[in-house]
Amino acid sequence: MCPASAPQYRPPATLHLHEPAQVPHAATLRRAVARWADARGLAPPLITDVELAVYEALINAVEHAYAADSANGGVELRAHHEERSLRVTVTDEGRWQPPRGPDVCHGHGLPLIRALTDDVAITPTPHGTTVTMTWHLTASSASD
């Protein structure tokens, strides 16, 4: 007799995380969204695109939302997976600042995000900026 297989954990359709806007926390959030997407059954190539696009949006928030000489604020990540779409938002609570130092490579984050997503919207407000990234899913990119 074969033992019954244990049900595989499937996380909720929505992921919501908030961390300080710092590089180590951006990396933590990037890994968290990749693990969540994998557990939701998304295809590995899509997960790679999501992970890279989300990380670029997070690094932009870390680099540009807060003044270098002030305490960092936070960054919020929300992801929602439906049958035929995946939407991820990255929101900061700051205002645009020039890059933090001469050693940082600049100017490639937003074009990369645009290349990796099906739709992207950047919404600046007086209280921060939200980057909304959307992927339209096909049967080969989603298990639902």
Image (cartoon, rainbow, N blue to C red):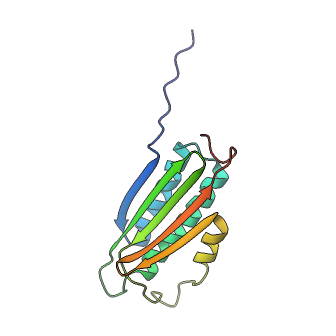
Q: Is residue 79 above or below residue 65?
A: above
Q: Position of residue 69 (x, y in %)?
A: 33, 88
Which quarter of the image is occupied by the N terminus?
A: top right
Give the total of numbered labels. Answer: 0
Residue drawn where x is 47% and y is 64% of the image = 89
Q: In this view, does 82 lie above or below 58?
A: above
Q: Position of residue 28 (x, y in %)?
A: 44, 60
Which quarter of the image is occupied by the C terminus?
A: top right
- The one of 97 and 29 positioned closer to us in this rendering: 97
- The one of 27 and 19 positioned closer to us in this rendering: 19
**Would residue 127 be found to the left or right of residue 99 on screen?**
left
**Would residue 1 be found to the left or right of residue 64 on screen?**
right
Q: Where is residue 50 in the image (x, y as percent from the top left)?
A: 58, 59
Q: Where is residue 76 in the image (x, y as percent from the top left)?
A: 39, 65
- Residue at the extreme left of the image, as rendered: 71
Residue drawn where x is 52% and y is 43% of the image = 39
Residue drawn where x is 32% and y is 75% of the image = 73
- Residue at the extreme top of the image, as rendered: 1
Residue drawn where x is 47% and y is 75% of the image = 123
